[in-house]
Image (cartoon, helix red, strand yellow):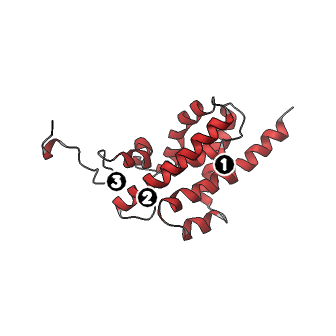
Amino acid sequence: MTTSPAMRPEPSSRSGFDPRRPHHWIAFGFGSGLAPRAPGTVGTLAAIPLYLVASTLAWPIYLSLLILFILVGVWACERAARDLGEKDPSAIVWDEWVGFLLTMIAAPTGWPWILAGFLLFRLFDIWKPWPISVADQRVGGGLGIMLDDLIAGALAAIPLALAAWWLSP
């Protein structure tokens, strides 16, 4: 059964989101990147439920899932950015989702750790110290979109892991 052109969903004129394209659903963080303000922050918040589910998995499975999300993200973000005609559109937030999951890779469970991971990741993602800024400026395409957030996630994971080690009995 086909639908008439009038019945097909159209891309959002504001964001360029096209619900007919699966890679848009992924790259836009299942719609969380469509937030009118602070889409990166909203996208990171939207990743928390995924983290809560993933955090119950054995560490090798968590790591495998993270690698899968990175590979899918490079593909989806590349295609969505190309569709939108921009290098790294703010509505693309899958990189925040995966960066947050990387931040939390060795964190203890519990809401204080989730809050700390969220704040650390957002700090590094917004501040973009070296080497995040280098990746952001010099690497293009889907890999570039993902890489700066992966580095931010790795850098945020370090103080989180150190705090967990220091606070452990």
Of the residues shown, which amino acid type is indicated by label 3?
A: Ser
Query: Circle 2 — which element?
Result: helix
Per the rendering, the mark at residue 78 is: 2
Lower sequence index among marks 3 and 2: 3
Q: Residue at x 43, y 45 (%)?
A: 26
Disc 2 versus disc 1: nearer the observer? 2
Q: Residue at x 32, y 54 (%)?
A: 16
Instruction: Report x, y in % for residue 156.
Output: 68, 50
Question: Disc 2 versus disc 1: distance between alpha carbons?
Answer: 26 Å
Query: Circle 1 — which element?
Result: helix
Disc 3 versus disc 2: nearer the observer? 2
Residue beneath label 1, please? Answer: 120
Give the quarter of the image for residue 112.
top right
Instruction: Report x, y in % for residue 58.
Output: 66, 31
Instruction: Report x, y in % for residue 78.
Output: 43, 58
Q: Is residue 166 or residue 36 the one in the foreground?
A: 166
Quadrant occupied by the C terminus: top right
Lower sequence index among marks 1 and 3: 3
Side of 98 relative to 89 (left or right): right
Question: Disc 3 versus disc 2: distance between alpha carbons?
Answer: 16 Å
Residue beneath label 3, please? Answer: 15
Per the rendering, the mark at residue 81 is: none
Q: Residue at x 61, y 68 (%)?
A: 134
> Which residue appears farthest toward the right when viewing the image?
169
> Which residue appears farthest toward the bottom when viewing the image?
138
Instruction: Report x, y in % for residue 135.
Output: 59, 65
Alpha-carbon neighbours of circle 2 within 10 Å: few (<14), some, or many (≥20)? Answer: many
| Residue 40 against residue 132 in the figure, above or below | above
Give the quarter of the image for residue 66.
top right
Of the residues shown, which amino acid type is indicated by label 1?
A: Leu
Q: Is residue 51 or residue 90 the one in the foreground?
A: 51
